[in-house]
Image: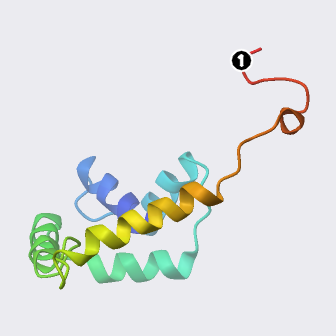
């Protein structure tokens, strides 16, 4: 991901075809070590392709991926189960005692 980000930053800076040295310069400027083989692979895969087209294709692929928010199968049973879990959590949580604060408070 860091190599793709550096490549995109180079293209945003006006470099149509960033080289390995360009990507390395960007990554080293923020203190990130570079794996030369991974960076070369990313550059080879992106060489000659339009960044705008790649982003468009990636967005279309992401649109087909299902996201969270699926409806529960048993509509009425889920809230009752959540309430029971909340009650059990409340019962198991012990009250902090005076000894546990080691003689000082956070805002003392």
| The one of 41 and 61 positioned closer to us in this rendering | 61
Relative placement, left or right, of 45 versus 76 is right
Instruction: Tell me the quadrant of the picture where the C terminus can be found.
Output: top right
Residue 38 lies, in percent from the top left, at 50, 80
88 left or right of 83 in image = right
- Does the rendering let one see residue 47? no
Furthest-top residue in this view: 108
Look at the picture and state if 16 lies above or below 42: above
Q: Position of residue 40 (x, y in %)?
A: 45, 79
* Front residue of this view, candidates 62 and 78: 78
- Tell me the element at label 1: loop
- Camera-side residue: 107 or 55? 107
Point 27% across, 65% down: residue: 17
In the picture, measured across the screen, residue 10 lies left or right of residue 101, that is: left
Q: How many marks?
A: 1
Residue at numbered disc 1 = 107
Rendering quarter of residue 107: top right
The residue that appears at 36% across and 75% down in the rendered structure is 43
Q: Quadrant of the N terminus?
A: bottom left
How far from the left and from the top, in percent, is residue 52?
A: 11, 64
For disc 1, the neighbor class at 10 Å (few under 14, some 14 to 19, many from 20) is few
Snapshot quadrant of residue 59: bottom left
Which residue is at 24% across, 77% downward?
77
- Looking at the picture, the colour scheme in use is rainbow
Residue 94 in view of the camera? yes
Above or below, 29 relative to 56: above
Q: Position of residue 99 (x, y in %)?
A: 90, 36
Q: Residue at x 30, y 83 (%)?
A: 45
């Amino acid at each position: 991901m860091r190599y793709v980000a550096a490549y995109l930053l180079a293209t945003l800076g006006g470099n149509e075809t960033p080289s390995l040295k360009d990507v390395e310069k960007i990554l080293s400027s923020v203190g990130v070590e570079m794996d030369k083989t991974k960076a070369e692979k990313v550059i080879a895969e992106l060489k000659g392709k339009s960044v705008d087209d790649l982003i468009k294709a990636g967005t279309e692929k992401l649109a087909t991926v299902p996201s969270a928010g699926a409806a529960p199968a048993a509509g009425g049973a889920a809230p009752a189960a959540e309430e029971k879990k909340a009650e059990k959590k409340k019962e198991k949580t012990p009250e902090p005692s005076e000894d546990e604060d080691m003689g000082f408070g956070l805002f003392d």
